Amino acid sequence: MGGAHADVSGHVKMYIAVFAALAIGTIVTVLASTVDLGGHWNVAVAMAIAAVKASLVAAIFMHLKWESASVIWITLLFCAIFLVVLMALPVLTSGDRPPMVQIGSWG
Amino acid sequence: MSAGTLPYKVEPHPVTGVYSGKLGTWLFLASEVMLFGGLLSAYVFLRVGAPEAGPAAWPTHEQTELSWKIGGINTLVLILSSVTMVMAWVALKMNDVAKGKMYLAVTAALAMTFIVVKLALEYHPKFKHHHVPSTNNFFALYFTLTGLHALHVLGGVVVILYFLLPGAGLWKTNPTYYTNRIECTGLYWHFVDLVWIFLFPILYLMN
């Protein structure tokens, strides 16, 4: 971030706006869950809203909007790849489930 | 700490472009992504694999007895604490240490509110109704994910209280160090908030 923050007081308005957006996002998530959108659409909508909220937190509160250091972006890129692979694993291995998943009890 | 023992504590490292503490914090957060990512993957795995009906079917809202109201209030508490955390950093950047500490104290108080709500209004009634991790896959995941997250909130409180009380003297000797440490604490804190943003819909709303 370096010395680019001489005018941090100007950030305050943005922080308040992000808070408002996050609060509204939370309410929208709850409201959206009460409507049956059919199929997996409820999950998709909830995850999409969560992704937007998370991006706001990362961009504004965690200052990634002003981050130019490539080392941080490379770190985040590897995180993203790792997450995608992790989330894809259950899909890729469908039909190959250990018995406790089907039984639902771990004893 | 004598000068020169750890270079680039304030000025950006010529290679990375950030000060070392910040790089360390981001690398730590990367490991945290993997920790929570693995557990979220387990959630998807068990959820997708759950049978449609029978005793192993994924529990409905009524069966889990999780209150979206309590979860929603805690979500608001946590995002508010993220705002106060970043405001503490802004105040320190503006050399207003009294205001900065006030915001830090509010952040810690909000974090403790989250913990108390979690324990008193959620965990306690759940245990009373014999909804424990061994009840089913859902509660195994619920307690693992929220428990690990709550430990992270508690860890944040410990760090914030450290900088409010025993670590506060650093402001007098080196305000830049102090401000940077609050920035790194904030990075961690916002990450904890970010995790909850995903946990709330996954656990409270999707059944």
Image (cartoon, coloured by chain):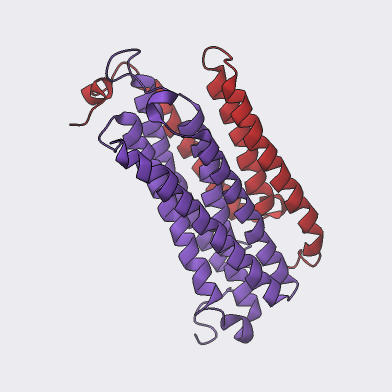
Q: Who is closer to the viewer here, B22 or B58?
A: B58
Q: Is residue B138 visible?
A: yes
**Residue furthest left as drawn:** A107
Q: Residue at x 55, y 62 (%)?
A: B109
Q: Residue at x 49, y 63 (%)?
A: B157
Q: Provide residue A78's location: percent of width, then percent of height.
A: 50, 43
Residue B118 vs B107, above or below: the answer is: above
Which image quadrant is residue B127 in? top left
The correct choice, above or below, for B194 with respect to A48 in the image is below
Q: Is residue B69 above or below residue B25?
A: above
**Residue A16 location (% of width, % of height):** 74, 51
Residue B20 as seen in the image, left or right of residue B44: right
Q: Colour of chain B?
A: purple
Quadrant (top left, top right, bottom left, bottom right) of the C terminus of chain A: top left
Closer-to-camera residue (A58/B156)? B156
- The chain coloured red is A
Q: Quadrant of residue B152?
A: bottom left
**Residue B207 coordinates in the image, percent (x, y):** 45, 23
**Horizontal side, residue B66 vs residue B110: left or right:** left
